[in-house]
Image (tube, helix red, strand yellow):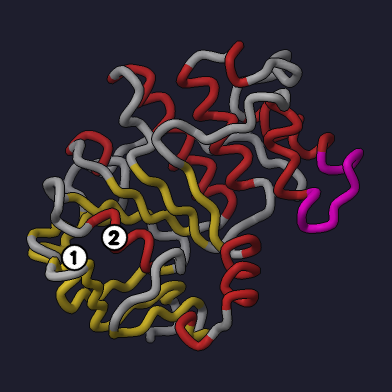
Amino acid sequence: MTSTSRLQARGLVRRFGSTTALAGVDVDLADGELLAVMGPSGSGKSTLLHVLAGILPPDSGTVTLEGRDVGRLDERQRSLLRRRSYVFVFQFGQLLDELPAVENVALPAMLQGTSRKDAVAIAAQWLAALGLAGKEQRRPGELSGGEAQRVAVARALITGPAVVFADEPTGALDQQTGHEVMDVLTRTTRAAGASLVLVTHDEQVAAWCDRRLDMRDGRVVTDQVSAAAAQGPAPVAQVTR
């Protein structure tokens, strides 16, 4: 692993019965890099995300985060890793319906030991930075799809993770709203100093990232710098973590 590598995978194999979802995949993710993983249904892209994130163990191969072999961790250690170093943004946000936006965002910080008062204050800063000032007390059902995804992005980044994993984060949104969410996700990830692994089937979504992997039949068939990497506006306002 190079001195700038944050996440590295070598020789990943994962099978489900007689189906080989990953057939010897190598991946390097640099500090602060935004990586898109593309491919048709069944290509292995979501399985790769889950193995990199420690949700699924590989049948063989290794995943290393900042020099630490994830495969050598026990379940408690992997759980702590997912809580402290990895965060997730999903297609439907997976916010808690009974909590207002500010508490949805604050929850990960509170789980790491931040007082409720401080966590809510930091969460409010994140929401303001993402254009949601005044909507802190709205519950997910009172937000638009794009607003809910912004809340999910704020929740993911409040604890200062090393890697953000995003699985089709714009899949449930219209094109314009998806564009806005990708702008927020990529700018805030960069501003937070995190790296991003994003699974998508959409070429326009992948173009927001620095690099793109294309997968077929459980293998990486191309690995290239994104030709249409987006030039977004100035970074969002910094928030205290």
Magenta range: 110-119
**82 displayed left or right of 185:** right
Asked where in the image residue 103 lies, by quadrant, the reply is: top right
Numbered tag placed on residue 127 in the rendering: none
- Residue drawn where x is 44% and y is 31% of the image: 92
Q: Are marks 1 and 2 in contact (CB under 8 Å)?
A: yes
- Residue drawn where x is 73% and y is 21% of the image: 136
Residue corresponding to mark 2: 47
Q: Is residue 113 magenta?
A: yes
Residue corresponding to mark 1: 21
The chief SS type of the magenta part is helix
Residue 228 vertical position relative to residue 19 in the rendered view, above or below: above
- Residue drawn where x is 80% and y is 49% of the image: 110
Q: Position of residue 5 (x, y in %)?
A: 42, 76
Q: Is residue 50 magenta?
A: no
Quadrant for the N terminus in the image = bottom left
Q: Position of residue 54 (x, y in %)?
A: 46, 68
Q: Amino acid at mark 2?
A: Thr
Residue 161 vertical position relative to residue 177 in the rendered view, above or below: below
Please state which of residues 234 and 66 is positioned toward the viewer in this rendering.
66
Please state which of residues 160 and 18 is positioned toward the viewer in this rendering.
18
Helix or strand or loop: what does disc 1 sit on?
strand
Helix or strand or loop: what does disc 2 sit on?
helix
**199 displayed left or right of 238:** left
**208 displayed left or right of 5:** left
